[in-house]
Image: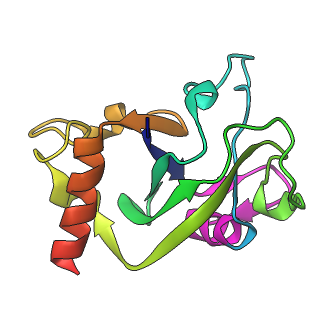
Amino acid sequence: MTNYWIFKVKDDSNGKFSRKGIEIYRHRMRDKAWGIRECSENGKRTANIDKLTRGDEVLFYLGGNDGHCFVGTCVLDSGFQNAIEIAVHAEYLDWNHGVLLKDISQWTRSLQIESLRGKVHFVPVGENFGSYLQGSVTRISERDYNTVINEHTRQG
């Protein structure tokens, strides 16, 4: 059974390096790998990572000041791994664990999340969608995934 996910990226820094979310996204697409922090700073395991499986479909969401939009899709080429076979680049805030990617589609035209208001459960009418998109990995329904894809195609 295929699962559907939103992977989120935003501007970030680690004290030594600072990168825009879109730069981090493009770097990860080139590497065909998505680094996922296994545990938060308080030691809690990242939600949903044990449910990520090969063949699952992913939407990429760019948050932050320059974002609030979907920027592409992919299919997972692995489940969560404690050591993915990629070169870790500290300047891109990479993690050495995460998932491998295939069938990557980087959209030339992003889809603003506001255009989905009331059409998907994670962008409800009249409410702040930010509370629905917490964490780095969010599970969504097949219906919501297809709605985003169809809306992107329609706005083409």
In front of the other: 24 or 30: 30
Seen from this angle, which residue lies furthest front?
A: 1
Residue visible at 63% across and 71% down in the picture: 23
In the shown orientation, is residue 2 left or right of residue 129?
A: right
Location of residue 152 (image quadrant): bottom left
Q: Nearer the viewer, residue 6 or 146?
A: 146
For the N terminus, give its image quadrant: top left
Q: Is residue 10 shown to the viewer in this render? A: no
Residue 141 is covered by the magenta coloring:
no
Start-end of magenta stretch: 10-29
Give the residue displayed 9% in from the left and 40% down from the top. 125
Color encoding of the figure:
rainbow
The residue nearer to you, when weighing 15 against 135, is: 135
Residue at the spot 46% in from the left edge and 50% down from the top edge: 57
Q: Position of residue 103 (x, y in %)?
A: 55, 68
Q: Quadrant of the C terminus?
A: bottom left
- 101 left or right of 131 in image: right
Name above or below for residue 8 compared with residue 26.
above
Q: Is residue 143 left or right of residue 43?
A: left
Residue at the image point whose x is 10% and y is 44% from the top: 118
Residue 115 visible? The answer is: yes
Residue 61 screen position, x and y as percent: 44, 55
Residue 92 vs 50, above or below: the answer is: below
Identify whether 5 is placed above or below 87.
above
Q: Position of residue 42 (x, y in %)?
A: 72, 18
Q: How many marks?
A: 0
Looking at the picture, how far across and down is residue 72, in whole percent?
44, 67
